[in-house]
Image: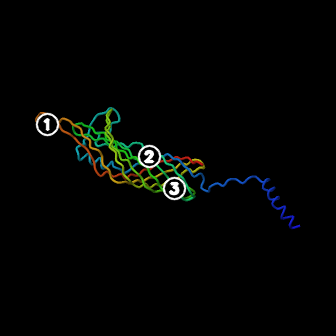
Amino acid sequence: MKALYLLLLPLATLAQNSLLPPPEPSVQSFGRPWTVSFSLVGWQSFGPTTTIVESMKQSGWTSTDPGGCFFGCVGPTNFPRVIKKTRFDIEAGYQTSPRHGYLVSLGLPFATEITGRTPGGLYLYLQSRIYYGSFRWAWFGLKNRVVGSVGPALFLVQDFEKGGARTSSRHSQLRPGVHGAGQVRLVNKRTWLLAVKVDARIGLPASTGTYEQETFIYPPQGGAQQTTFRFSAEQLPTFHINLGMQIGFKFL
C-alpha cells in the first residue's frame, strides 16, 4: 500500500499544480529601479561671478549710469551689473538594491550675464556659464524618500561677449571636479516623484578670455585720445551650489 502511495504522489502533485493559478512574478522591494528626472534650479550661489565683477572694477569697467525713466524709477544703475539666468539639468538613475544605486547627470547649473560699463559709455556684456556631466554613487533611505550621492564630474567653463547682434567666439575650458547631491522626495509614487534637490559641485579654477574695446576720450584741454579698454580674469572658482525642484518618472 505504501508503494502505491509513493507511485501516485507525483501525479497528485502535478494535478494540484495544474489547478492552482501560476505564482506572481517577484517584485523588487524598492519598486521600479530606473528613473529619469528633470530639475529646474531656482537658487544659485557662489561660482565665478564675484571674481569677474572684481576684475571688471579693477580694469575700468565700472561706472554709474544716471539714466532716465518715466515710470517706476529706482535711481541710477551701478555697473558691473549681474543678472542670473534660468538653469536646468537632466538625471538618469538605476537602483540596484533597497540602499544603493547609480546616478548620471548632465546640465547647465550656472549661467549669468555680467555687464560692465566704462565712464565713457562702453558696455561689455559678458556671458558666464558652467556646463557639467557627472557619475555618482547613490544611497537611499527612509523608504526611498531621501537620496544622497557623490562622484566625479567634468565641467565645461565657458564665457563669451554678447551685445545686440554681435556675439564673440566662445572661450571654453574643461575642468575636472566632484559633484555631491541630496534629495528629499516630497511625493514618491510608483511611477513618478517630486523632490527638493540640493547640488554642490567643485572643480579646478578656470579663466576667462581676453576682451577689448576701443573708444575716444576727450580731455578738458581739447583734442581726442584713443584708448583701449581690456578685460580678463584669472583663477575663477568653479564651486557652486544649486537648490531647485525635481520631477522624475520611474520605469521597468
Secondary structure of the residue carrying tag 1 is: loop
> Along the line of sight, which residue is nearer the eye, 198 or 160?
160
Residue 107 bears which disc, if any? Answer: 2
The x, y position of residue 195, in whole percent, is 51, 50
151 vs 217: above or below: below
Categorize mark 1 by other alpha carbons within 10 Å: few (<14), some (14-19), many (20+).
few
Q: CA distance from mark 2 to mark 1?
A: 49 Å
Query: In the image, what residue occupies the spot 38% across and 51% down?
Result: 240
> Along the line of sight, which residue is nearer the eye, 88 or 8?
8
Q: Splitting the image into 4 quarters, where does residue 80 fall?
A: top left
Asked if the residue under mark 1 is in contact with the one under mark 2, i.e. CB atoms within 8 Å, the reply is no
Q: For the residue marked with disc 1, what is the amino acid?
A: Pro
Q: CA distance from mark 1 to mark 3?
A: 63 Å
In the displayed structure image, the side of residue 202 where residue 227 appears, left or right: left
Q: For the residue marked with disc 2, what is the amino acid?
A: Gly
Secondary structure of the residue carrying tag 2 is: strand
Categorize mark 2 by other alpha carbons within 10 Å: few (<14), some (14-19), many (20+).
some
- Mark 3 — residue? 147
In the displayed structure image, the side of residue 184 where residue 166 appears, left or right: left
Q: Name the outermost residue toward the bottom.
A: 2
Which mark's residue is nearer the viewer, 1 or 3? 3
Q: For the residue marked with disc 3, what is the amino acid?
A: Val
The x, y position of residue 144, in whole percent, is 56, 55
Point out the image quarter for the N terminus: bottom right
- Mark 1 — residue? 219
83 vs 153: above or below: above
The image shows a total of numbered marks equal to 3
Q: Earlier in the sequence, mark 2 or mark 3?
A: 2
Secondary structure of the residue carrying tag 3 is: strand
Q: Earlier in the sequence, mark 1 or mark 3?
A: 3
The x, y position of residue 134, in whole percent, is 44, 51
Which mark's residue is nearer the viewer, 2 or 3? 2
